[in-house]
Image: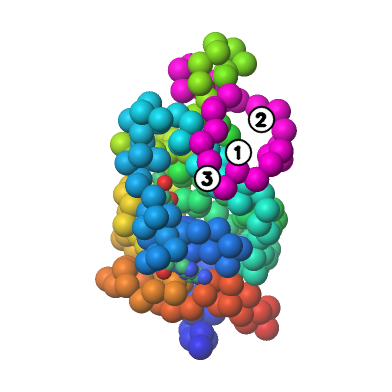
Amino acid sequence: MIDPALIDIIKAAKRVVVFTGAGISAESGIPTFRDAQSGLWEKYDPEKLASAKGYRADKDLVWGWYEWRRMKVMQAQPNAGHYAIAQLAEQVPDLTVITQNVDDLHERAGSQTVIHLHGSLFQPRCFACARPYQFENTALDEPIDGRCLAPPSCQHCHGRIRPGVVWFGENLPTDEWRQAETAAKNCDVFFAIGTSGVVMPAAGLPVMAAKVGATVIKINLDSMGLEKVAKYRLQAKSGDVLPLLVDLLNK
Ligand code: OAD
């Protein structure tokens, strides 16, 4: 299933980038965004739930939705794909994990440094003064299942707290984006795993890597996307193919 030439390329690589999307966490039970039927954007309106305008219009709805998602992540466990990426970091001289995910499953699987391009469910901040907010309880007291929930108030200015994620119409965090671009432009091997590759600017990273001559490897259940960019396209579950790849590297 995996071309031996690909294993040789990874073995020879000095700098590897692993770029992930919602698909890497799907096998942990975290919903993706664009899957038919089960995807979050199939069920919910992104304009209402993932924009500053939507938050202004109904803060309790938006805060409740993100707390429901945070709760789902806290109940979930990293899967074989997350663990394999942490192991891969031991097998190559330099590995950078860049994720579009707002969960913490890479970190919990042992990846040391993770660049979060779209923020984190665990780093909310004040909508008014932008200072970070410390959750009083790391766990939620009761299951909320998407109910409306009033956002807490800022410990400094008493403004309302917003989720620490990047919404539509907002810029990516500057430092994280700079680090991601630098990593993509300086790698020999670039994995694009479990992402539909439609949300810019993140989706531009594999193209940047290909332009500097890196071998782009796409791992996705779906065959679409990155046709011109990815030299290797593994159509499989990331939780199946990544452990296999790590095993082959050990041989
Ligand atoms: P999407 O939901 O757009 O894409 C998920 C991809 O993962 C799809 O291509 C699936 O085929 C694939 N997939 C599902 N299960 C898989 C598995 N077990 N193994 C491998 N692949 C699998 O999610 P993203 O590409 O992450 O942004 O979406 C990008 C951004 O769009 C998100 O970060 C979010 C959203 O709007 C913001 O909220 C800012």
| Disc number lying in front (3 or 2) | 3
Residue 31 marker: none
Dominant SS in magenta: loop
Secondary structure beneath label 3: loop
Residue at point 32%, 72% (across, down): 224
Q: Nearer the viewer, residue 219 or 146?
A: 146
Q: Position of residue 59 (x, y in %)?
A: 45, 29
| Magenta stretch contains residue 150 | yes
Q: Amino acid at mark 1?
A: Phe
Instruction: Answer with left or right where residue 45 lies relative to residue 67.
Output: left
The magenta stretch is 125-152
Label 3 environment density (alpha carbons within 10 Å; few <14, some 14–19, many ≥20): some
Distance, label 1 to label 2, CA atoms, is 8 Å
Residue 146 marker: 3
Secondary structure beneath label 1: loop
Label 1 environment density (alpha carbons within 10 Å; few <14, some 14–19, many ≥20): some
Q: Position of residue 198 (x, y in %)?
A: 31, 57
